[in-house]
Amino acid sequence: MRRQGIMALALGAVLAVASPGPGARAQGLVADSSRHLVAITTGFVGTDVLLFGATEGRGDVVIVVRGPTRNEVTRRKGRHAGIWVNEAEVTFTNVPSYYWLAASKPVDKLLKPEALDRHGIGVEHLAFGTQARLGEKEIDAFRQGLLRNKVREGLFTIRPRDIAFLGDRLFRATIYFPANVPTGPYTVQVFLVRDGRVAGAQTVPLNIAKVGIGADVYNFAHDNSALYGIIAIVIALAAGLFAGVIFRKV
Amino acid sequence: MQIYLPIAEISLDVFLLLAMGGGIGFLSGLFGVGGGFLMTPLLIFIGVSPAVAVASEANQVVAASVSGVFVHMRRGNVDFKMGAVLLAGGIAGSSFGVWLYSLLRAIGQLDLVISLSYVAFLGIVGSLMLAESVRAVLRRRSPGAPRRKLHQHTWMHGLPLKIRFRKSKLYISALLPLGIGFSVGILSAIMGVGGGFIIVPAMIYVLGMPTITVVGTSLFQITFVTANVTFLQATNNQTVDVVLALILLAGGVIGAQFGGLFAGRLPGEYLRLLLGAFVLFVGGVIMYILVAPPDDIYSIGRVAGR
């Protein structure tokens, strides 16, 4: 964990210098997070990660945090014979499992829509793929449904969170990960915006992983599912017999 | 105190889970029912995904029924021959059920089928319990009512493959217990229940088994069938949460003891009346969820695989 942290710092420094921002001179951004590994343990109920950094000179900052992408099925219910039944589904590809956004000003005032699309800033600007053969309007309704569900699960941020500035240059923001946060490699992108353009960018690595007994159980259940099943049965049998012995009434 | 359940992938309060285990355990001790058919809906109500609720509850039922099997074995109340035939049907049925379950999950209709099965079975069982207990209450008030004939000959006795079950004093077609085992096996896989609330009446009224061997033999079959469901759910769907099952079990064991203490002190008819009403209530809540307009007609689900 410590080595990862040091590597991240080094990587951050390299990126800060070498990242090919649109402006040739304009780099001027350095950022890091308080943690590079969020460990989901048995007592995990959600956590904060502090992201902090400094800009060289004035500028606005936008932070985008993305979880590993995956395919997400969105289903629509319809009323049939009085009950609500899933009647149609659309599979979206390339959906980040987690999306968090913070900005020092409203993002549509900072950047043009094309730039927001290019950098995926704002859920409306994320490019989901789909192969569903439905009308554009219908697909969009499914897309909105997907976003609503993700917001309800606490995994998507629609309205950008605030970034606190200390003076002109130092900034910090607190990223919240809820208890149901998906695991895997995350990307934290920090953009420096000047004069309506992205003048610099830096990526801070972040990993969310299950650790401890919970992780062992999960991995074991997936990697050795047959043995896991047998052990589950044996534990249940043992627990049942044990309970029976303790409470035996003659 | 929150605990992160590794397979369910959510955090829940340990004491809430213990209380649920204890409450359902109390009912099972009081009424002599398994309680799986009440626990699975409760787990779904508190936010466990139906897939994990069903599979983990099957795991818990293994533990809940095994000690009963030994108690009944010591008393010689298990008809092993009948149990084996029921079990053969049960293994086939539950294997088919888990296959069906995976299929339904893939096409997005699993939750609906689980809910509908619960509405149907809780509705039927609750109504039957209510009706039966009301009759019993009335009979109690007017003693001397005629007793029902125990054993009647019907078309079922003309089926082939007749086998003699000495312990149960029956000479019936093996197809009957096979069929019952198969049907209950499917329910066990899809609803995460032992199926005692179906198999016990079926053994008494369809097979005509003497009541004394029914409970032990059904527990024998339920232990193995739910073990089979646990194994198949673990290998096919990875939805068995051992931690969840163990917490529920811990609460359940204690609750069942208290339930057992109370059971002897309260009149059976009124207890069954109460349980029947409760079962109907749970079924009603699930029905309401199906019928009421959802908050959002769009929902999301993961694509199979990690």
Image (cartoon, coloured by chain):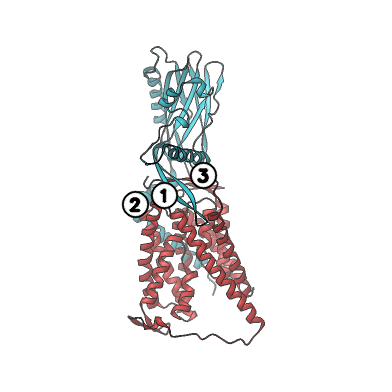
Chain colours: A cyan, B red
Residue pointed to by mark 3: A43
Residue A100: % across, % down: 49, 32
Residue pointed to by mark 2: A224
Crowd class of label 2 (few under 14; some 14 to 19; many from 20; radius 10 Å): few
At label 1, the amino acid type is Val
Front position in the image: A147 or B249: A147
Query: Which quarter of the rendering shows the C terminus of chain B?
Result: top left
Marks 3/1 in contact by CB < 8 Å: the verdict is no
Helix, strand or loop at label 3? It is loop
Front position in the image: A44 or B302: B302
Helix, strand or loop at label 1? It is helix
Seen at 48% across and 51% down, the residue is B49
**A197 relative to B111, above or below:** above
Q: CA distance from mark 2 to mark 3?
A: 25 Å
Front position in the image: B4 or B70: B4
* Label ID, residue A217: 1
Sooner in the amino-acid sequence: mark 3 or mark 1: 3
Crowd class of label 3 (few under 14; some 14 to 19; many from 20; radius 10 Å): some
